Image (cartoon, grey):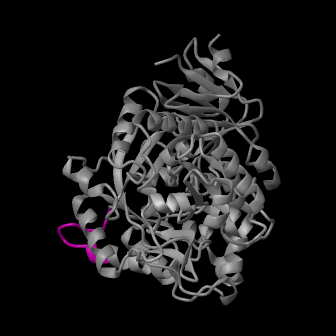
Amino acid sequence: MSAPLLITGGRIFRGLSGGFAEALLVQDGRVAAVGPAEEVERAAPNGARRVDLAGRVAIPAFNEAHMHLLPYGLALSQVNLRAEQVTTLDELLRRVGEAARKVPKGAWVLGRGYDHGALDVGRHPTAEELDRVSPDNPVHIVRTCGHMSVANTAAIRAAGVGHNTPDPEGGAIERRGGELTGLFQERAMRLVVDSIPLPSEDAMVAAIEAAGHDLAARGFASASDMNVGMTAGLNEIAAYRRALAEGRLIQRMWQVLAGNPEGIAEAAWNEGLRPDHTHDMLAWGAVKVFGDGSAGGLTAAFFEPYLESAGGGTGMFMFPDETIHRLLALYHRQGWQLDIHAIGDAAIEQVLVGMEKADTEEAPLAGRRHRIEHCGFLNAGQRARMKAHGIIPVPQPSFMYEFGDLYVRNLGQARAEAAYPMRTWLEEGHNPAASTDCPVCSVDPFANLFTMVTRRTNKGTVLGPEEALTMEQAVHCYTWCGAHSQFAEGRRGTLEPGMQADIAVLSRDIFAIPPEELLAVEADLTLRGGEPIFDRHGALRAAAA
C-alpha cells in the first residue's frame, strides 16, 4: 500500500445521507476519516500525501451499472458512426468506404453507432449503398441501440442468407419486393454476427484495458459487461480472467452472462462457473435474457402501438411467454441474479410475470435483487409489484438525452414524458441504478447527470420535468444505487469511514454550477482503493514528490 492520502481544499460529497465534508483521509485503500478539515488533519499521519481540491469537488467514483465493456473496447477500433459525428448518409458511406480501402480485400469492415432517425435521409442505409463503397469487403454496421444492423451483399452472402431464409424467432430480416434490403433486426442479427471472425484473446484483453482506461478518465472505478459471451463465446471469460491476472483490468467489474439460447450461460455453468457477488475485481453475478428490443428501433414491445406516422405496430417479443419464463426460472434456481432486458410495458409485464412465477418457497425472490434492465416505459402497477419483490430498475437516463426526441416521434408526447421516471423511482424506494448502456450511448457521465437534473434531450427538448433530480440525488443514483444493484453497497458507493476509497475528483464543483456547464466538466483524478487509475494533472505524482 502507498502512503496515506489527505484530500482537502474543496467539498467532498460523502453520499446522499452524509452530505458534504471538508476533508477526507485514505489509509490502506479505505476511507479512514471524513469530516471537518481540522479534525481530519489531526487524524492524518506524518508523511501523508496531499491533494488540494482548490475549489473542485470529490465524489464517490461513478459506477457504470449497465454497459458492455468488451464490445465498447473493440468498438474503439471500428468505424465510428455515432450521430454526433454522422448526420448524413453520404458521411456514413464515406467513413465505411475509407475503412474498406485500408484493409485487404475480403476483410470485414465493422462499424457502430449510426442512428437512422438522425440521418438526413431518415432511414437505414441499404446493402446496395454499402456495396457501392465496399464492393470487395463484407460490411456490417450496427445501429446505436445494438438491436438492428445493416449488412452489405458480401456480408449477407458470407452469412448464407438468401431471400427465402426464414425469420428466426424473435428476429426479422427485412425484405422489399422479395429482395433483401440488408437490414437485420434483433435475433436475426446473429445470422451475420456468427459469420464474423472472432477476435483473438490478445485483442480482447487489449480492448478490455483500453475501455477501462477510457472509463477511468471519466471518473469510473466500477463497471459492468452486460452480455458476456455474445462476441466470442466462452473465450470472453478467459480474456477477462487474463486481464485480471495481468493487472490490465482497470474497473471493478460486475459480469453478466448472456443467457439467451445462443448465449453461454449453460456452457459456463457446465464448466463450473457459479454466482459470486463478493469478488472485488471480477464478480460473476448475473445472467441476462432479452425480453424485447428498442423503442428507437420500433422493436420494444408495448401494449399500445407506436404512432402510425412512425410505422405502427406494437414491437417485438424475443420469446414467447413459455420460453422466457422457463429461462428465468432456471437461472433463478441456479442462484444467479436476473438482469433482464425489457423496455416496453408489454415486455416488462412478460418479464415481471416470469420473475413472479419463479418465486417459490425453495427459491424465494426476496433478497435476490433481480433487475429489469432499461425498464423505460412502465405503469404504476408494475412499479408497485417490482417494489414488493425487491426487483430493481436499471435505467439509462442518457436514453432521454440521446433518443428522447425520437421517443416523441415514435410514441407521442405523453409516453415520452413519462419514460424513465427517475424521481418517482427514487422517491418510491426502487434505488434506480443510473447507467448508459455504452456503446449504445456515450459513456460520458456528465451528459447523463445533465439529463437527470434537467430532463433535457440533446436537442433541448424538456420531457417530464417533474422527474428531474437534484444533483445530490443524481450522483446517488450513479454511485450508491449502482453498488446496491451489485450487492456492493456495504463496500463502495459512499465516502464514509471504512468504505473502499473509490473516489473521483472532478474539474468543477458540479453541485454549485448551472446544469448547462456540466457538459464541459471532466474527471481530474480517479482512485480505486486509494490508488490512481487516472491522474489528468499528475496530482498524486506531485503529492508524492
Give the quarter of the figure containing the C terminus: top right
Q: Quadrant of residue 143?
A: bottom right
Asked whether the viewer can see residue 467, the reply is: yes
Residue 462, magenta (yes or no): no
**Left or right: 462 as drawn, with respect to 478:** right
Residue 123, position as x, y percentages in the image: 69, 72
Front-most of 306 and 462? 306
**Left or right: 129 as drawn, with respect to 34:** right
Q: Quadrant of residue 506?
A: top right
Residue 526, position as x, y percentages in the image: 60, 33
Give the residue at x 71% y 78%.
408
Give the residue at x 56% y 65%.
426
Look at the magenta stretch and give its main secondary structure: loop
Q: From which residue to which does the magenta span run? A: 356-367
- How many numbered marks does the figure carry? 0
Asked whether the viewer can see residue 17, the reply is: no
Residue 365, magenta (yes or no): yes
Q: Residue furthest left?
A: 362
Relative to 517, does residue 33 appear above or below in the rendering? above
Give the residue at x 55% y 62%.
153
Give the residue at x 55% y 47%.
72
Residue 254, position as x, y percentages in the image: 42, 47
**Left or right: 230 as drawn, with respect to 305:** left
Residue 375, position as x, y percentages in the image: 51, 70
